[in-house]
Image (spheres, rainbow, N blue to C red):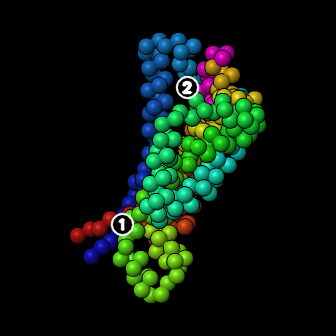
Amino acid sequence: MAELKPQSALSKMLNAAWVRPFLFLVCIVVVWDLSIRLFRIPAYQIPSPLDVVAVLRTEWPELLRQSWPTTYATVCGFLLSALFGIPVAMLIAGSKTVESYVYPLLVFSQSVPKIAIAPLFVVWFGFGIIPKVISAFLLGFFPVVVSAVQGFKSVDPDMVDLARAMQGSRFQVFRAVNLPHALPAIFSGLKVSVTLAVVGAVVGEFVGSNSGIGYVMQRSIGTFDLPTMFAALVILALLGVILFWIVDRIEKLIIPWHVSQREDVIFAS
């Protein structure tokens, strides 16, 4: 008979989703600090964790203000990649002709470094937010398309035939069979996309910008202000984690029935 194993309060706390990554992060910071002290690494090469924390504490208002343009460009680029990527994936999965023409070009486009073409966006669209949004969109678009195509192609043909035999229209079959079956793969692509969109936005800010975390990093590198640069990296990491968590929460709300979203049950004999 199946039953849940009783867990102590300490065990529950250690099994919390945020505790283990936090403990691992603490270990990384401790090793970082010990390595600097042990090998006497100069501050102009790698700053100590305390210096980075001091910059985060003193410069937090400025870093937070500079993070808004990066966040805005990231979110806009990510939404565009989802808005265009999923329909393109539907076309590729639904038509061999479209797949033969479009899919190889999409794969080929990924071999072009985005940092190499980002200056063109500045030439074409100026130094505003548009080049950053386009850079974020380009990096986030491909994972959405690949994952969604895989999801739509993995639908069981017998289920589709059964729905059609029940006189379901193409839209009804898509809504009841194809889309629910593809949603887990789509959300997997969206999770990858949202983190890559952060990278794309920073790439756009590296090329030409007077605001954003990428601008802060570029300015810090120019002045060898490594603590500020590491603090900016921490802000970017937090931004990526938060956006990933938001997408993950949306996934749990939309597809709570999927096996990946169910609570783990331990069976005892």
Q: Please, is residue 88 above or below residue 68 in the view? A: below
The overriding secondary structure of the stretch rendered in magenta is helix
Q: Which mark is residue 49?
A: 2
Is 98 part of what is drawn in magenta? no
Query: Residue at the location (66% across, 21% down)?
Result: 220
Q: Position of residue 33 (x, y in %)?
A: 49, 23
Secondary structure, mark 2, is helix
24 or 183, nearer to the observer: 183
Q: Earlier in the sequence, mark 2 or mark 1?
A: 2
Asked whether 34 or 128 is in front, the reply is: 128
* Callout 1 secondary element: loop
* Whole-percent x, y for residue 259 in the image: 40, 66
- Identify the magenta region: 222-235
Is the Cβ of the residue at disc 2 closer than 8 Å to that at disc 1?
Answer: no
Q: Nearer the viewer, residue 44 or 26?
A: 44
The answer to whether residue 258 is seen in the rendering is: yes
- The reply, left or right, for residue 254 in relation to residue 73 is left
Residue lying at 37% horizontally and 71% vertically, measured from the top left: 156
Q: Nearer the viewer, residue 163 or 18?
A: 163
Badge 2 density bin: few <14, some 14–19, many ≥20, Cα 10 Å:
some
Amino acid type at image mark 1: Val
**How many marks on residues?**
2
Residue 38 vertical position relative to residue 218 in the rendered view, above or below: above
* Residue 14 numbered tag: none
The label number, if any, that marks residue 265 in the structure image: 1
Left/right placement of residue 69 relative to residue 13 reads right
Name the residue at 47% across, 63% down. 95
Q: Amino acid at mark 2?
A: Pro
- Taking the image as shown, residue 209 lies to the left or right of residue 83, namely right
Report the quarter where the C terminus lies: bottom left
Confirm whether the magenta stretch covers residue 233.
yes
Q: Residue furthest left?
A: 269
